[in-house]
Image (cartoon, coloured by chain):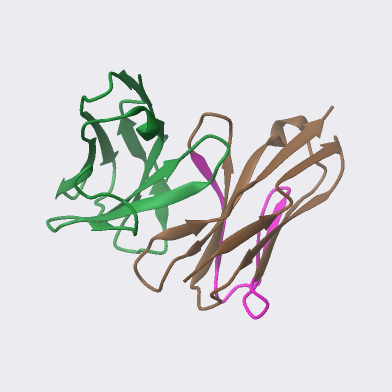
Amino acid sequence: GAVVSQHPSWVICKSGTSVKIECRSLDFQATTMFWYRQFPKQSLMLMATSNEGSKATYEQGVEKDKFLINHASLTLSTLTVTSAHPEDSSFYICSAGGQNTDTQYFGPGTRLTVL
Amino acid sequence: KQEVTQIPAALSVPEGENLVLNCSFTDSAIYNLQWFRQDPGKGLTSLLLIQSSQREQTSGRLNASLDKSSGRSTLYIAASQPGDSATYLCAAPGSSNTGKLIFGQGTTLQVKP
């Protein structure tokens, strides 16, 4: 099946720094990628929809200036958490959809800890 | 707006039992529904994808059903094993043809040996 990777798998940073998370579709082209956030013992919440070559669509309540998304190619989307704070500590998961949006493939997730 | 609810939030059963996990959704105009498994601290593993035209899908000891009219889906696990212990998430499309998924809160299953 299709494979989606995320890098890094975990990251620890100081408050106020920015962190970039990469999501790659390894063996297929993803016109659409999705970014989710999961707090401990909670479910996944969609943050934004990333479309190749255009601006991301953010869900209500998600600060687009804080969570910068770039989808510059059909195999790579990046999420940058700017000026991270401890409350941004979470598990970030991306998924990628191919031409058939019925199917999404999920990455392994990135655990962000902000000290 | 699509909302997905899973019951129960947690379930503990002895090994060998058959069990049913429930998922309900508010917007029945869905084109599919998915069940995922998540182990602690890990990503998602897709278990079953049911298209709107299907009533059920089976994979090994897992069987998922879909009833759009009632807004419900169930995941049946037969002959449960300790290795089945994980959190099970169901997800429904948020709106047609955008691809985004709305997840339930999950059911955390513990199968005791």
Q: Measuring 74% from the left and 51% from the top, which residue is drawn there?
A: B8
Residue A16 position within the rendered picture, expressed as x and y whole percent measured from the top left: 22, 25
Q: Is residue A84 above or below residue A29?
A: above
Residue A90 position within the rendered picture, expressed as x and y whole percent measured from the top left: 42, 33
Q: In which quadrant of the rendered image does the C terminus of chain A lie? A: top left
Residue B76 position within the rendered picture, expressed as x and y whole percent measured from the top left: 75, 54
In this view, the residue farthest toward the bottom is B69
Q: Is residue B45 left or right of residue B86?
A: left
Which quadrant of the view contains residue A5? top left
Q: Is residue A24 above or below residue B82?
A: below
Q: Is residue B95 left or right of residue A72?
A: right
What are the residue bounds of the magenta stretch?
A: B44-71
Question: Chain B drawn in what color?
Answer: brown
- Compare residues A30 and A34 and report the one nearer the observer: A34
Q: Is residue A31 visible?
A: no
Q: Is residue B2 left or right of residue A97?
A: right
Q: Which chain is green?
A: A
- Compare residues A2 and B32 and report the one nearer the observer: B32
Residue A25 position within the rendered picture, expressed as x and y whole percent measured from the top left: 28, 43
Q: Is residue B19 left or right of residue A85?
A: right
Q: Is residue A99 visible?
A: yes
Q: Measuring 40% from the left and 52% from the top, which residue is drawn there?
A: A46
How many marks overall?
A: 0
Q: Was residue A105 drawn as part of the magenta stretch in this picture?
A: no
Which quadrant of the view contains residue B97? bottom left
Q: Was residue B67 drawn as part of the magenta stretch in this picture?
A: yes
Tell me which secondary structure the magenta stretch mostly adopts.
strand
